[in-house]
Amino acid sequence: MSSDRPESSDRPGPRKRPDELRSHAWYGDPGLRAFGHRSRTRQMGIAAEEHLGKPVIGVVNTWSEINPCHIHLRQRAEEVKRGVWQAGGYPVELPAISLSEPFQKPSTMLYRNLLAMETEELLRSYPIDGAVLLGGCDKTTPALLMGAVSMDVPAIYVPAGPMLRGNWRGSVLGSGSDVWKYWAEKRAGTITDEDWAEIEEGIARSPGHCMTMGTASTMTSAAEALGMTLPGAASIPAADSAHSRMAAATGRQIVEMVWNDRRPSHILDRRAYLDAITAVLALGGSTNAAIHLVAMAGRSKVKLTLDDFDALSRKIPVLANIRPTGAYLMEDFYYAGGLRALLAQVRDNLHLDRLTVTGHTFGEVISGAEVHDADVIRPLDKPVWAEGGLAVLRGNLAPGGAVIKHAAADPRFHRHTGPAVVFENYQDLQQRINDESLPITPDTVLVLRGTGPKGGPGMPEYGMLPIPDRLLKQGVRDMLRISDARMSGTSYGACVLHVSPESHVGGPLALIRDGDLVTLDVAARQLSVDLSEEELARRRAEWTPPVEAYGRGYGALYLDHITQAEEGCDFDFLAREGTVAEPESR
């Protein structure tokens, strides 16, 4: 992090007294319950002077031995705690579920709301005055922030940071993006099994999340743009010593935030969410941001819609030359100036007078940021893409909306009509995609249904449908693909995603059949099927709802309460208005 950023400010409001701390209700009363709290603290070897009258800081840690993106967060938690101690606070580490994108099935999206619930209730049920949230892997960022927003104690985020560049035979590898690229080449027969094994060992070389502009880097950057991290935090590689220093500085910052009662509700207004969208678009970020930011805004009681994304996308160019839209990786982006430098390029489109966790305005935070490599972070007159990389589509195939990352697609598919070949679910796709009896040509529109929020279940990242092997061998590397699924932010291609309402609840995607003509027109923001309303109604009357995947447990709770993609896929009971009483602690 550069040294030209302002130090923290005491704005806003008067400084709290120790007896006004939330934790005082646990520790400060002369009665029996507080005696129990204090004596149990002594049981842990903590003396009174170490914690009484000090802000209790919950360090919510999503570290896990099965999450390579977070494998270093055990050490970062210690560094955060060091900063808390330095600033006169009392840190307590609170383990939370780790959403490991590489390993968790059927999808970490199934569990995003579970982590949000856990975060909220951890902060509510314990004597926590402020929170440091440690995460980074895809769904973890929105989940932690959603929980903290709903609880609304002072909170600050520590992004896990991107891993270092991959390497194979002198070529730079990017996680995710080059996995899809070389998997296609292996299926096409242009690389060997030995080549593939070498790539496996060279593509992920350090702790940290994906170093391409996947969902992880998109959402940690969005968190910084929201004003919920220290300035510059999102771009620091996980293995860089600056990351450790940032963690300790965050620990110091949260103590100051508690004394000044600087909470998410003071920071996260509509302006903040619009600026986060602007950052995502300038980065060429993941389509998943359209779901997560809507859900996060809902927790802040801010109305954010797909139309907000589309309106900004028409005027915000892609300036970050990062894979999969561009050529470089997050490590290069950090050296080029990071997110502050990127945001400085589009400052005329930002709300510079809003508050951040530092107590300074957003404008003050990005002031003085410089670009050190103009090919990695492009100027406005030389963008990677002239408009934002995300387009919102509507039409009789997607009345609730759909999205496409058109900047990462072959431009010839930006306006395309072709006959559909339909797959009922992901298993059907896997079994039949290479069936040579299917009439699949480069102009075919591949359609996958049964993969939405309920149908997946959990809306898995199946949206980058595989191209048939026989077409790969002919040199085909992109086709128009449509689904109610999501796709990894590291993915690319002409993939229409988040089609809503999803097929599982009877959306139009459930009614499409092989041979139906489907049209995509990105410029017109249209996605349609060449069927009359009468024909669609006739097919709808014949449609039978599918069997639910879960009859009990968390999965049943999920299916009963999950909302559709354009609503953020939050649980309806978490997003609705209502108060929650503080726990009785005496």
Image (cartoon, grey):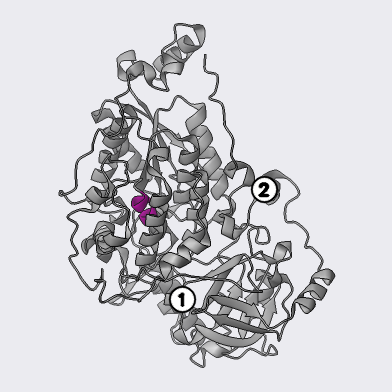
Of residues 376 and 314, which is closer to you in this image?
314
Asked if residue 556 can be seen in this view, the reply is: yes
Dot 1 lies on which element? helix
Residue 385 coordinates in the image, percent (x, y)? 35, 76
Please identify the quarter of the rendering in which residue 341 is found.
bottom left
Q: Residue at x 41, y 59 (%)?
A: 277
Dot 2 lies on which element? helix
Most common secondary structure along the magenta stretch? helix
Circle on res. 32 = none
Residue at the limit of the structure toward the right, as seen here:
542
Residue 97 coordinates in the image, percent (x, y)? 51, 43
Is 221 one of the magenta-colored residues? yes
**Residue type for callout 2:** His
Q: Residue under circle 2?
A: 561
Q: Residue at x 67, y 48 (%)?
A: 561
C-alpha span from label 2 to label 1? 31 Å
**Residue type for callout 1:** His
* In the image: residue 396, left or right of residue 282: right
Q: Residue under circle 1?
A: 406
Of residues 174 and 481, which is closer to you in this image?
481
- The magenta-colored residue range is 220-226
Q: Residue at x 72, y 61 (%)?
A: 505
